[in-house]
Image (cartoon, helix red, strand yellow):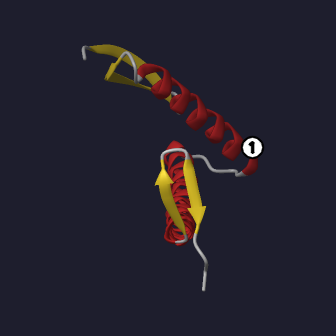
Amino acid sequence: MSEISINVTIADREYPLKVTQQEEPNIRKAVQVINDRIIELKKSYGLKDRQDYLAMCLLQFVAANTRMEGYNIESIENINERLASLDDLISNFLDKIKFVDKDEIVLLDSK
């Protein structure tokens, strides 16, 4: 993939980047989200230093990412448990049937 050069502005500072064309929309969206968050922080806090706003912005994003990672791990574990349960149900059902031919299935006695 070929890279393109773009300039982005974060907290009133320009940064040159090399990104793929596929990455560019995501990078530009991320820059917009960061700048919007900094504006919100400026309204809420009386900080003077740009680095303080960037640090608080970073803290919020990392905290949100950490929460999402925990959610994803819990979701995967939940899905694995449900798949194991479905596997058991299917195995139990298959143990109770007999295939006579391709068009006929007979349910065996559960005695």
Q: In the rendered picture of this protein, how many numbered marks are placed on residues?
A: 1
In the rendered image, the residue lying farthest to the right is 43
Residue ID at (24%, 14%): 2
User: Can the viewer see residue 13?
Assistant: no
User: What residue sits 40% from the left and 24% below the top?
Assistant: 23
Q: Is 9 displayed left or right of 41 in the figure?
A: left
Position of residue 6 relative to residue 48, above or below, is: above
Q: Nearer the viewer, residue 40 or 73?
A: 73
Q: Toward the viewer: 111 or 43?
A: 111
| Residue extending furthest toward the left | 2
Identify the image quadrant of the C terminus: bottom right
Which residue is nearer to you in this view: 41 or 81? 81
Residue 75: give x, y in percent of width and height: 56, 62
Counting from the top left corner in percent of width and height, residue 67 is at 57, 62
71 left or right, relative to 1: right
Q: Relative to residue 30, is residue 109 drawn left or right?
A: right
Q: Is residue 8 visible?
A: yes
Give x and y (percent) for residue 7. Answer: 40, 18
Question: Mark 1 Cα within 10 Å, few/some/many (few <14, many 20+)?
Answer: few
Q: Which residue is mark 1?
A: 43
Picture residue at 62% right of the left edge, 40% below the top: 38
Instruction: Give x and y (percent) for residue 110.
Output: 61, 80
Identify residue type, mark 1: Lys
Position of the N terminus, as image quadrant, is top left
- The answer to which quarter of the image holds residue 8 is top left
Q: Secondary structure at mark 1?
A: helix
